[in-house]
Each structure stands twice: as structure tokens, then as C-alpha cells.
Amino acid sequence: MSALPKGFAALEPFVGVWNAPDLAARAVLRDDSSEAGRLAFHAAMQPLVVPALDRLDGKQLDALDVAERRLFELLLAYPHVAMAVEVQGDAEAKHAASRRHMRITPPA
Amino acid sequence: MQDDDILDMLSVEEAADRFGRGPLSAAPYHDPDWWEREREAVFLRSWIHIGHVCEVPEPGSFVRREIEFARASLLIMRGRDGQVRAFHNACRHRGSRLVDEMSGRRSKLSCRYHMWTYGSDGALLSAPDFERFEVPREGCALKPVATEVVAGMIFVNFAHEPEQTAREFFGPIAAAMERLPVARATCFTEWTYEIGANWKTNFDNFQENYHLRFIHPRTGEQALGPENPFGYPTHYGFLGPHRGQKLWKNPDPPPVAGSLKLGYARVGELARREGLDFPKTDFKLFPCFHMVGLPPYQNYTHTMYPLGPDRTRGQVRMYWTAPPEDAAAAFTREFAAVTIRDVLSEDREAVEASQQGMAVIDHIHFQDHEVLLRHLYLEVEKRVRVHVATRTLAEAAA
Ligand code: FES
Ligand SMILES: [Fe+2]
């Protein structure tokens, strides 16, 4: 069985790297990532954001199967990486240091 | 109702004419004695945002809040009667802290020390060997703090008898907040931070656009244009101690970074699905509460709790009317949270640096487009002066 739904094989190398269960954990993935790691994930995920949204569309979140849940988590890691790559650019490392003070409250 | 209909909207010149120009003493931004007076005159007698009804959904649900400026631990609890109340987290027998957990659900609260037991409305239900105390049971209820719910948010006031209800205090802003997602929120995304800055230093940062181009060169560029290079608001609005602004609309904004558009792509559809309909909102509520509505989908609060003359805790909450129903909702919310947190962390860094020199500069200077900062300064100062004068009179009379 593949780790991701059909059509998303290009994201296989990022499973287990960019998956995390909640906003706080995904913010940490961004903080701890390397520039090369961000660029690679960004390049692979960008063309698949809309297909992923379409693939998961209309499904209740608690009804996602294991592969869909992985895809969902990768999808939610994307905003973090997009901000780093597309907006912060070369300021990302410095920005990460100030961002750490903004402590996300974990889900109850 | 829009902010425009609620606030007295003035042009920058009109606002400066009304509230003045020129330097002001920097002492209120760092002086420990001033802070002590401010604590008494402002924070112990104003309505302070401390939570949301969705945190105490069921009878018996409670949260504990440490309120440093009041040197108080509070329990916010929903009673069996459905009402939300706040009490000091202190046993009436001999003051023991009653609850250690930060949140939970209980039908009764028992003190570990001698087992005095209170109901969810704070009443003393039982106390071992109570006949040996010479005090009526009614006099032993948990000590209440004035509490009011407005737009789903819980406000407390440490005054023994607040001069106004919270609703009176907010005036027509209360009704405007009732229209926002916060009023029927069931969950929120939250982050908190500590900052080495006076609460006003921190709050002020969110009352001016003068810093945008310098502190947010990347995240703020949408708000700047050649005809308004600082992205100044077009109007400043006032209502009693509260204030707001009307932002300039950039007629020709630079293109949004590719993926950020994806974050907004479905906001209209989600807002319709969740039945949201609210105007752009930007209220700076006295003393330390900022309410922002970004139609069609985002609504966040930013509250600044002073910890001392040069230390503050900030809390940001993005309120949602329901848990995300599907991937599109979750993705859109994640984008919103990441974007706003990125911007606010740039602010935190700049504000902390700006506190460092407050004690040496003697005076601070506000330009006309910093009139909202001046307004907060004057509102605080007015209360401190009245408080000090009243205390001096009382002392003279005694
Ligand atoms: S202090 Fe709580 S029962 Fe004695
Ligand atoms: Fe800012």
C-alpha cells in the first residue's frame, strides 16, 4: 500500500518529514528545517495543493483514511513553508528566532 | 454597523487638533511608581478580557487564570444554572489555593486543607465541624469578581462595584462585536508571548502604521503605495476611551505572493457556509484589548496583560465558529494563523527593542499619525490623575 493517495507519489519523500498533527508542531517543523529542505518540499507541494484540496474535498476530517490523513498533514505544512520561501526569503533564519517567542497553545 | 458609524471619525489634522501635538513625558512607559498608580487607577477598575464562553461549555466547566496585575488567581466557572462567574481561587477559610489545574470540570470544589466544599456557583456547601465557626455560611462563598459576557467573551472587573457594566463601557462597540465570529465561536487558535516592554509600548505598536514599511518590508507591502508610502490610515476614530482607524485602501497593490492567494481562495465559500457576514473591524478597546475583523473569514483578538512596568504578556486568539469541517477550512485557517503570527512576531522584536531606551529619552514624540497612541496616553493619564487626587483628598480627610 502506498503512503499517499494515488496521484501524490511526488510527495512520498516528504512523508515523515513534513507531517505533524497540529499547528504548533508544524510551526516547529518550519523552525527546525533547512533552506534546502524547505525549497524541496515547496517545489514538490506547490503544484499539488489544489489537487490535494480537490482530492480531500467534501470529506469530513475524521473520516480520512491513513493515506488521506498523511496528505492532509502535508497540505497543512504548506502554508508554513510558503511563508518561509515566498515571503520571508533570506530573512527566514532571523525571522525564525523572533517567531519562537510566539508560543502556540497546543490543542486541549 | 461599520466602525465609521460607531466611532467619531476624524481626519489626521482634525484628530491632532483635538488631542494635541508635541512631546510627552516618557515616564509612564517605564517608571515603576507610575505603573503602580496605573495598576490601581486603570487595571483594577476596567473591564478586562480574560476568556471566552467556549472554554467553559458545560455546567461545572472551569478555567483558571493567573492575573498578575491584580496579583490574583481566578476561577472562571459555569454554574449549574448556566451562568458564567469568576471567583478568586482562594478558599474562604484560610486562603488556600483551591484549584491547581488550569481547566477542568467539577460539580463541586473542595479545598484540600480542611475540606471546605463549594458549589459551581461559588456557594459554600459544606465545611467539616462548621458549628464551631462563628460565621454564617452565606458569608463564606468564594469571593466573586464582577464578570460579564459580551460577544461570547468573558470580561472581569476587579472594582468592588464597577462604575459601568461592560456593555455600557463598550457602548455601540458591543453590538458591533456581537456580529463577529467571536460571538458564536466554539474554538480558537491561540498563541501567547512575553515581551520585555511596557504594555503601552506594545499596544502602541498596533496603533500606528508609521512602522510598517520598516518592520514589515515583506509582510506589509500590500498596505503601501506610491501615493501613501507609509500606508497611513485615512481617518482616526474615537469613542470615549476607545479608538480605531479607517485603513487606506491601496488602489493598486503589488501582486500577492503566489501561494498566499491559495490561502484566501476559499474564504468566501467558507464564510457563506459558516453563515458569516461582518464588516472590516479594528477596535482598540481601553485599556489593552484589540479586536480585529478581517472579512469575510478572519477575526482575532490581541490582549496585552501587564506583568510589570516593563514586561507584558500578549495573547492572540483567532476565533472560529466551528471546528474545521474539511480540508479546505483547515488549510485556510492554517494559512491565516501562519500569516498573522509571522507579522506579529516582527512587531514583537521591534517593540522589545523600543522599550530599551525609554528610561533615558525623557520625552517621547508623537507625530500626527500617532494620534491614537496619544489618545491612549491621555486616557490613562487622566485616570491616574483622578485616582491620585481622590486618594490624596481621602488621606487629607482622614
Ligand atoms: S483553607 Fe481551605 S478548608 Fe481550610
Ligand atoms: Fe506591525
Image: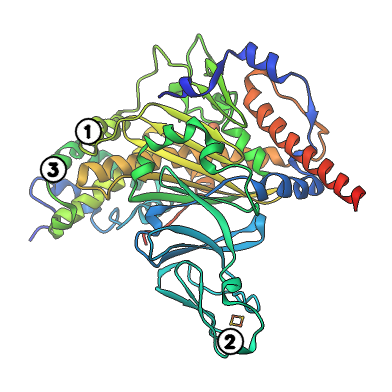
**What kind of element bears circle 3?**
loop
Give the class, few, some or many, for how many residues have Cα within 10 Å of label 3's Cα (few <14, many ≥20): some
Give the class, few, some or many, for how many residues have Cα within 10 Å of label 1's Cα (few <14, many ≥20): few
| Residue ID for mark 1 | B272
Residue A96 visible in the picture? yes
Q: Are marks 1 and 3 in contact (CB under 8 Å)?
A: no
Residue appearing at x 65%, y 52% in the figure = B159
Q: Callout 1, which amino acid?
A: Arg
Q: How much space separates mark 2 and mark 1, taking CA atoms? A: 58 Å
Q: Callout 3, which amino acid?
A: Asp
Residue A100 visible in the picture? no
Give the class, few, some or many, for how many residues have Cα within 10 Å of label 2's Cα (few <14, many ≥20): few
Residue appearing at x 34%, y 28% in the figure = B257
Q: Which numbered marker is on residue A66?
A: none
Mark 2 vs ligand 1: CB below 8 Å: no
Residue appearing at x 40%, y 53% in the figure = B53
Q: Position of residue B305 (x, y in %)?
A: 60, 49
**What kind of element bears circle 1?**
helix
Q: How much space separates mark 2 and mark 3, taking CA atoms? A: 62 Å
Callout 1: chain: B
Q: Callout 2, which amino acid?
A: Phe
Q: Position of residue A47 (x, y in %)?
A: 20, 36
Q: Quadrant of residue B341?
A: top left
Q: Quadrant of ligand 2?
A: top right
Residue B77, placed above or below residue A41: below
Callout 3: chain: A
Q: Are marks 2 and 3 in contact (CB under 8 Å)?
A: no
Q: Are marks 1 and 3 on the same chain?
A: no
Closer to us: B28 or B156? B156
| Residue ID for mark 3 | A57
| Residue ID for mark 2 | B130
Q: How much space separates mark 1 and mark 3, taking CA atoms? A: 16 Å
